Amino acid sequence: MSHVELQHITKRFKTVTALRDVSFEIQDGEFFVLLGPTGAGKTTTLRVIAGLEKQTQGHVLFDGEIVDDLPPPDRDIAFVFQQYSLYPNMTVYDNLAFPLRAPMRRMSEAEIRQRVYQAAEILRITHLLERRTAHLSGGEMQRVSLGRAIVRQPRIFLMDEPLSNLDAKLREALRVELKHIQKTQGSTTLFVTHDQIEALTMADRIAVLNKGRIVQIGSPIDIYDRPATIFVAQLVGVPRINLVDARCEDGTISIVNSPVRLPKPVSRELPRTFKLGVRPEHVQLDPQGEFVGELLLIEPLGVESILHIKVGQQSLVCTVPGMTRHKLGDALRFNLVRDRLHYFGEDGVRIQV
Amino acid sequence: MTATTALQAEKVTPRHRVRRISDKTIQTAFILPTMVLLILWNIFPLFYSLYLSFTEYSVISGAPPRWVGFENYRNVLSDPLIWKYFALTGRFALLSVGLQTIIGFAMAMIVRAKFRGSGFITTLILIPMMLSPVVVGKFWAMIYNPTFGPLNYLLGMPPPRGPDWLANPEFALWSVVLVDVWMWSPFVMLLCLSGLKAIPEYLYEAAAIDRASAWFQFWRITLPQVAPLLMIAILFRTIEAFKQFDVVMGLTGGGPGDATELIAVKLYRIAFLGRFDTGIASAFAYIVLIIIIAISNLYIRYLNRLRGEA
């Protein structure tokens, strides 16, 4: 069993407050992702759990027990750093075996060997075992770093943007592998990233962090379909969500500076002015569509195309599958998917309808 | 329109003439004096002394150099005293550089940690190596002085009980080593410090999480990362140790007897005292040069191997 809980963690450095009242729980076997922009406090959270930083307030609990005063080696965690933290003068084998050779583990060389080979096979680095780590490529080094974490079968894996130093292709491949390993091993993982795609593809649950505060915790579907704030809505999803000023009068919603008019959803009142969010895939082209706009720009990506449509003074982004035959300047008719619209108040908080 | 352009062109031309010195000329003007000095002071003496090393010649005799082939080299290499001084210099280098390495590295480890006043202390430690070696030699001679020097007082041996450090053949070499170590350990420290500061903190953090002992962290992280810079420090200090002259002259002048007669001191005696044996001194200097180059090469090769691995 490994269950990690943070209770009201606040961390202040000399002049800045890095974390403010951060609380969440990670269940046994869960892949939990901390998502946020640079400087949001993701790494600090990780370091507090590892014991590399001491929180100013609050508690860290492992399996229900407070571990605030345990130093890092006694917390039984594995940490994968953004930079490959390998011992340059040792072979890959010795790097992998190293955490197992700590005297207090009293593990036999035979067992160490078996565990190292097992980890190497999972990560497909068996052929590198005899090499010195200084001669490895970036992808290989990060695999070895991951290997050094998984040989130990720790309580929890803490990963600090382990993929961000790799090139795009490698990142994609390792992302899939990492998720596969996590699922087959059932290991509890806290993964930190600023990349929303990594978060959406790998996570069981995501916690979105901004300026040291937790903004939202939920499954990838929750985060994507019901973003709690404008910040979350804009952080997740490519291309970005369309966000326009809107007004609500006499039961009609009108997008400012455009001819688009929509009926107000019946369930709840809306303020007079608010922000309307529409995901690009919910701007749907339709020859019988209700609204009309002018095609401003096309970004063909192959698997889909991104169209920028000018409606009045506003511009909406829309995605269509495959390559498009439309030309710049074409008049396009489209619909907005009504039950997929997002309403945010002037304070940026979601208005539930 | 055309008229104005022509007028402007006319105005511009004389100014152009003043600035007619080409980049190439300026380049030459800057480099030439340095080249001339370099040739006069370095390159010419280098080759002239090579020529003199094959001749019988004394600068004070007035007689022209007489070609004697390899005789000077034969004489120097077959002189058992010279070999004794080489051995002495080797011993001096080993002791002095060894101690400087250990002490310099240890000091670097201490001032590496940021504490109140660590910057100030680092600066203080660096002062000895900024002093003139002759001055250092002279005032250490006073510190060592058996009648009024403070060293024996500090050791709890006021006169007449304390030893005469510089006059005692057993202690003299050690006394010179001590001064050299005092003066040059800061240099080793400085290089080590820059190496230590470049080691990323996460390597230690990763090791701590893996339950690595402090000894392991030192042996597997700190030392390998500092090693290339440490080797450079050792290389520099070894070369300097073989050339050690001014501190010895300030302290003992090679004495008592020949207890601190390092090769550079011996070389000075041959070249500038007594008969001024310029020819023999030149040959001797070349032998020293070849030995230093050989040692440096071995070092550099080792250094490159170390780099290749890291």
Image (tube, rainbow, N blue to C red):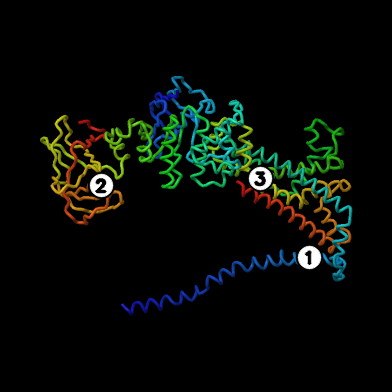
Element under label 3?
A: helix
Q: Residue furthest top?
A: A65
Relative image position of residue B87 (x, y in whole percent): 83, 49
| Amino acid on which disc 2 is placed | Thr
Q: Calculate the distance from the C-alpha at mark 1 to the C-alpha at mark 2.
A: 82 Å
Q: Nearer the viewer, residue A197 or A96?
A: A96
Using the image, tell me which numbered label, if any, was put on residue B50: 1
Residue hosting label 3: B230
Corner quadrant of residue B219? top right
Residue hosting label 2: A319
In the rendered image, the vertical position of residue B60 relative to residue B228, given as above or below: below
The reply, left or right, for residue A185 in relation to residue A270 is right
Task: Tell me the quadrant of the picture where the N terminus of chain A can be found.
Answer: top left
The reply, left or right, for residue B83 in relation to residue A348 is right
Task: Tell me the quadrant of the picture where the C terminus of chain A can be found.
Answer: top left
User: Which residue corresponds to the image point at 68% horizontal and 52% vertical from the top-left?
Assistant: B301
Relative image position of residue A199 (x, y in whole percent): 37, 37
Relative image position of residue A261 (x, y in whole percent): 13, 42
Corner quadrant of residue A38? top left
- Dot 2: chain letter: A
Q: Nearer the viewer, residue B61 or A116?
A: A116
The reply to whether callout 3 and callout 2 are in contact (CB within 8 Å) is no
Relative image position of residue A331 (x, y in whole percent): 16, 53
* Pair 3/2: label in front: 2
* Pair 1/2: label in front: 2
User: Which residue corresponds to the image point at 49% horizontal and 39% vertical from the top-left?
Assistant: A123
Element under label 1?
A: helix
Using the image, tell me which numbered label, if any, was put on residue B158: none
Q: Nearer the viewer, residue A111 or B84?
A: A111
Q: Calculate the distance from the C-alpha at mark 1 to the C-alpha at mark 3.
A: 34 Å
Q: Earlier in the sequence, mark 1 or mark 3?
A: 1
